[in-house]
Amino acid sequence: MTCDWVRALLPVYPEADERNAEMVRAHISNCAACRAEYEEYESLRRELAALPEFAPGVYEAIASQVRERIRRSRRTPWYWAAVAGLILAAGLGIRPAEVSELRLAIKAPEPPAVQAGFRNPVVHAAPRQRQVQKPAVAEPMEIRIVGDDPNVLIVWQVGGLPSGGGDL
Amino acid sequence: MVTEAVNAQELSMVTPREDARPLAAFEEEMRRHQRMVMSVAYRLLGSIEDAQDAAQEVFFRMYRNWDRLDPDRDAGAWLYRVTVNVCRDMRRMPSTELEDCGSEDTTEARLSIEQGLERLAAKEREAVVLRDVEGLSTEEVARILGATESTVRSHIRNARKKLREICFRRRP
């Protein structure tokens, strides 16, 4: 068995069949150069398998981060409805200082209508009523934002996701 | 990132699922495979912080596919594949600062295994990590990487040869 043959075999020595492995062992016991090369491969294999000690809390930190991502990914429709309501309020110019009360009411709408209060009570003295036909949804809800001005009332009515929706 | 701890029971209370498999089982599966995912990710990415980010993404994907995973089969093979994919994606991201190997640095007697791995082709690195870090068989590595066994054998042989050349042939 020549050195070239053995050196070609050394990278795959762990997978070599018993006959080849035995020939390599016999060769490196008598050949210092091939033995040195074999030792280098063995050293690399040991290094690869040896992992650093991860900090004690690393696994719990991963688990916590995963749980948090799961929690965020599964926020229920009313959470996003509330966010949308607040964005709407901001869009209508209601500054935080003007909001004396913010109520989030979650309930089945009765009747299923949207009331809209506006900043100008003269123009909209009688709030418009409008029937809303909605598809079958789960857990419809209503969000009311009340400002300092008693004429200002924002009612944000939101249906839940259709049944089966919201899956990841 | 917010790291508020939420236990599995709280999760199931906040968002009741129609799962046949409870979240407690997911937690258990996650804990069982954390070390394996971290070791592969660490060897593929070369940094504990990146490995941690990868592990988080891997287990979140496991959660998203929880209903599709066969409870009667070990999730290990699936997790290996996802870990390799996540690490591939992270290496493509410009924001992931992978360590510069210092190609001109000849002051070290030899380069570290991390530096050596960094210089391998992606497929060689993945094959040798799964084989030599995790001790998987060539057949298992081939299945995880979606390659033939002869291709994997070739990747492993090349990877080991290159690692030796890189790590032991850079003497001052």
Image (tube, rainbow, N blue to C red):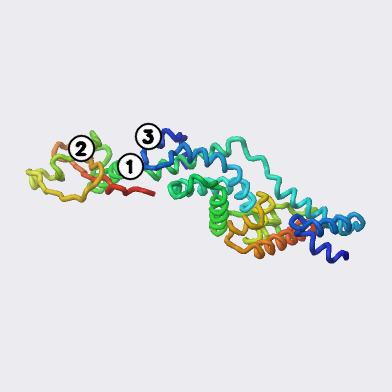
At horizontal 44% and vertical 39% (from top left) the residue drawn is B23
Residue type marked 1: Thr
Q: Residues within 10 Å of mark 2 (few under 14, many from 20)?
A: many
Residue type marked 3: Met
Q: Residues within 10 Å of mark 1 (few under 14, many from 20)?
A: some
Q: From the image, which quarter does the N terminus of chain A lie in?
A: bottom right
Residue type marked 2: Gly
Is residue B107 visible in the rendered image? The answer is: no
Is residue A130 visible in the rendered image? The answer is: yes
The image position of residue A48, as x and y in percent, is 71, 50
Residue picked out by circle 2: A147
Residue picked out by circle 3: B13
Q: Are marks 2 and 3 on the same chain?
A: no
Whether residue B163 is situated above or below residue A164 in the rendered picture: below
Give the spatial CA distance, label 3 vs label 1: 12 Å
Label 2 vs label 1, nearer the camera: 1
Residue picked out by circle 1: A76
A23 or A126, nearer to the observer: A23
The image position of residue A127, as x and y in percent, is 10, 44
Give the spatial CA distance, label 2 vs label 3: 33 Å
At horizontal 36% and vertical 38% (from top left) the residue drawn is B16
